[in-house]
Amino acid sequence: MNARLLPVVGAMLFLCAGLLNAETRKLTREDCVTIALENHPTVMVLAQEQKKAVANYRLSKAPDRIQVNGEVKTAEYLKPESSSTGFNVPGRDTTIGIFAGTSAIYNLVDPNISKKQQAAKLAIDMSKMNEIKERSTIVLNAKAAYYAFNMAIENVRLREKLRDKYKVKQETTAILFRNGLRPILDVTKADVDLASATLEYEKARNQENLAKTELLAALGVMDEEIEVEPIKVGVLPSVRFSYAELYSLAENNHPELRIAKLNREIQRINIEVERSAGSLRVDLMASLGFENKNLEGLSKIQDNAKPANWEPTFHAGIQARVPIYTGGAITARVNAAEAEYSKSMYGEKQILLGVKALLRNYVQGMEEIKKQIELSRLMKINAEKHLALAQRSYDAGVGSQIALQDAETAVLDAELFSARARYEYLTILARLSKTVGIEEEYLCRK
């Protein structure tokens, strides 16, 4: 029995080893973006929307081809004694017959067919742009969540470092108090500081778990053991375009703006379609089959199926139709189409205004963050110098624990501020890339 279980146990151990290897694999930012694009259901939905748009385009081309139907219909034929020029009463001056066969219709004139095909083709382009828009949103969310998780990890590291320092300080202060070198006030202050640092550390851990959950949601995965590789940024990338150049790029590449332009063009075509609804339509019609020109009544209904009563027949003709009175329906549809076109224009202008505001905020924000990072670098240098002096004064017995604590907190604040500013800068750069519609590598100097 145990020998039989050995292969099963071995397979389970192999599977567990594989899972452990998967858990220890660290993901880079590019890995996160790739996973998000592969797993997000929105991408699959938009792929189906593209298929639907292609199918609608094929549907719009169908009226431009011959349409063949099988049909059975009744027909009226003049009796031999009836006049072909006077007014004839159905049933009295005509006989009721039946036709069975195939009929074909081919459109000769219809100004709407080409316009509908053009609108359907633009709808395909719009579905592609919708996919680009959603993919850019997914990429941005993955990058932002990746940066936030890295920042949370850095925050935990620094908070843990500060907590450990306060723990050592609390132990040292207790020893000095027992030796009569520190008052009881320093001991209680050390206890409070350690508790406060521990609380901040626990808060940082909770924030890390939250950031990890948000990253998993952005990636579209449920693997709670996922790890990320911290991004290494020596010099922050600089955008090589001015605000005016960025706006010019956004006018041609911003996904929502391109969608709005396509929608405006489709609405313009719809106005033409509705206006031409009152135009002449001409169809070539033909039918081939068999007809029975004189149906018998119920008493002789079986005679209707006799082959002798059926004759082959062929009919062809041209049908022209033009609306004369529609009760104002055409005018109403034209007015509705014009309103939709106006809405699309206003929507496009609104997007332009939003893009301008976003670009201005992003450009100014990145410049301000660069200045803040430089200030934080200087602040950290000064804080470290002050900490060294405070530590020597405290060790010599002339400095206070409060001064030493403030000095250590200043160093921590400088490191946290620098890290937060760097990740905020990278996040804004990702948002700028999405707004302009251009990859970050192209926007930034090499």
Image (cartoon, rainbow, N blue to C red):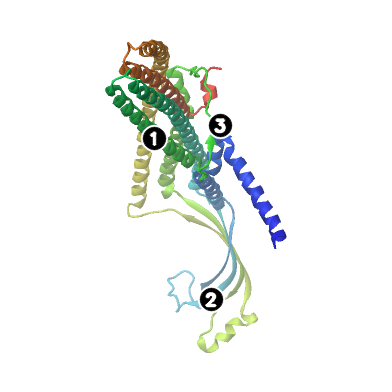
For the N terminus, the quadrant is bottom right
Which of pointers 2 and 3 indicates the residue nearer the eye? 3
Rendering coords of residue 90 (x, y %): 44, 75
Query: Looking at the image, is 372 positioned above or below residue 316?
Result: above
Q: Which class describes the residues within 10 Å of circle 1: few (<14), some (14-19), or many (20+)? A: some
Q: In the drawing, does residue 221 fall left or right of residue 395?
A: right
Residue at the left extreme of this rendering: 185
Which of pointers 2 and 1 indicates the residue nearer the eye? 1
For the point 45% across and 40% down, the residue is: 213
Q: Looking at the image, is mark 3 or mark 1 earlier in the sequence? A: 3
Relative depth, front residue between 234 and 244? 234
Q: Which class describes the residues within 10 Å of circle 3: few (<14), some (14-19), or many (20+)? A: some
The answer to whether the residue labelled 2 contacts the one labelled 3, judged by CB atoms less than 8 Å apart, is no
Rendering coords of residue 437 (x, y %): 49, 29
Amino acid at pointer 1? Glu
For the point 55% across and 39% down, the residue is: 35
Q: Is residue 199 visible?
A: yes
Where is mark 1, residue-wise?
Answer: 202
